[in-house]
């Protein structure tokens, strides 16, 4: 199995960090929020669309290619981990070394992993990783000034396990969703409902429908919130977010303004 070195070819504004003088500065490359799946499987899944630009030698998306990377935490501890590509989920998979890192930092679902390019850095496969505790069980605020658009559900949306979102709405409000122009076929978004629960949704472009289809996660969302045809799903931009693929979602039951939440 070939092993590759990773080089960085992007530059951005440098942000100053001071962790007991160990790092003078760093560039934030990307960040990912941990899920229950990450916790249960003892590995970290990084959406490829978020990180591909920073792993150029893995952009061929070859599952047989792996790379060893070195990460340093904010307490100056070094960790060696293995990075590979997982084709089913279109993600980069961090394994060997991750479990010890995970336990040392007592990470849980909804915590944030922020990946920086440290400066100075030891070599081209060196990262500075910052762990930020997530805020759990907090209901989001829906500000009408941050309202984006709405989708009225059809029988097909409810019964066939996919939601069709008009192309112009996605392009206008979520330009980072780079389908079909991108080199991959799947992207993801994180939705937060009125109860503060997060939903991971896979998105694909449906050329025949001139729109985008929300797949994995949608069927469970419909069942849990007991949605029916003619109900309306409204999208809002979060007050604060660490991910441009994040949206707040609010539902009206058949236009009567009933909140989109489980009974009881």
Image: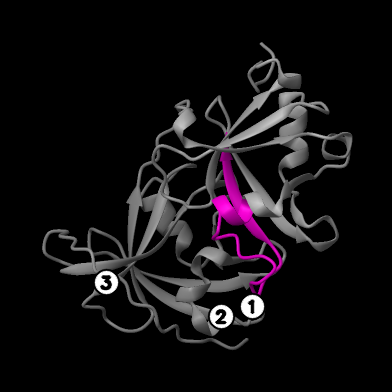
Tell me where residue 158 sits by quadrant. top right
Instruction: Give yes or no for contact between labels 1 and 2 (Cβ–Cβ under 8 Å).
Output: yes
Residue found 66% across the figure and 47% down from its top: 201
Check disc 3 and report the residue beneath it: 118
Q: CA distance from mark 1 to mark 2?
A: 6 Å
Residue found 66% across the figure and 53% down from its top: 168
Q: Residues within 10 Å of mark 3 (few under 14, many from 20)?
A: many
Image position of 187 (left or right of 121): right
**Quadrant placement of the N terminus:** bottom right
Q: What is the span of residues highlighted in magenta in the rendered image?
A: 170-192
Count up the numbered dots.
3
Residue found 63% across the figure and 18% down from its top: 259
Residue 139 image point, x, y percent: 48, 25
Q: Decide whether residue 177 is among the magenta residues.
A: yes
Q: Earlier in the sequence, mark 1 or mark 3?
A: 1
Q: Secondary structure at mark 3?
A: strand
Q: Decide whether residue 176 is among the magenta residues.
A: yes
Q: Secondary structure at mark 1?
A: loop
Check disc 1 and report the residue beneath it: 61
Check disc 2 and report the residue beneath it: 58
Instruction: Give yes or no for contact between labels 1 and 3 (Cβ–Cβ under 8 Å).
Output: no
Q: CA distance from mark 2 to mark 3?
A: 20 Å
Tell me where residue 176 sits by quadrant. bottom right
Image position of 12 (left or right of 141): left
Q: Earlier in the sequence, mark 2 or mark 3?
A: 2
Q: Secondary structure at mark 2?
A: helix
Residue 203 image point, x, y percent: 69, 54
Q: Is residue 111 above or below residue 210?
A: above
Residue 30 image point, x, y percent: 42, 62
């Amino acid at each position: 199995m070939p092993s590759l070195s990773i080089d960085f070819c992007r530059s951005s504004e440098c942000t100053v960090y001071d962790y007991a003088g160990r790092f003078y500065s760093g560039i934030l490359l990307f960040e990912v929020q941990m899920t229950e799946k990450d916790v249960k499987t003892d590995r970290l899944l990084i959406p490829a669309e978020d990180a591909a630009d920073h792993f150029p030698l893995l952009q061929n998306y070859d599952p047989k290619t792996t790379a060893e990377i070195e990460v340093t935490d904010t307490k100056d501890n070094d960790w060696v981990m293995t990075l590979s590509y997982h084709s089913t989920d279109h993600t980069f998979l961090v394994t060997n070394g991750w479990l010890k890192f995970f336990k040392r930092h007592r990470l849980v679902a909804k915590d944030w992993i922020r990946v920086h390019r440290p400066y100075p850095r030891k070599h081209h496969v060196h990262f500075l990783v910052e762990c930020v505790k997530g805020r759990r069980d907090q209901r989001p605020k829906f500000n009408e000034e941050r309202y984006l658009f709405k989708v009225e559900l059809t029988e097909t949306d409810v019964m066939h396990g996919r939601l069709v979102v008009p192309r112009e709405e996605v392009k206008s409000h979520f330009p980072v969703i780079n389908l079909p122009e991108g080199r991959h076929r799947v992207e993801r978004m994180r939705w937060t409902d009125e109860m503060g629960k997060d939903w991971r949704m896979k998105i694909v472009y449906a050329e025949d429908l001139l729109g985008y289809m929300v797949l994995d996660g949608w069927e469970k969302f419909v069942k849990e919130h007991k949605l029916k045809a003619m109900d309306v799903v409204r999208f809002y931009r979060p007050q604060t977010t660490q991910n441009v693929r994040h949206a707040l979602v609010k539902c009206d039951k058949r236009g009567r303004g009933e909140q989109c939440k489980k009974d009881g």
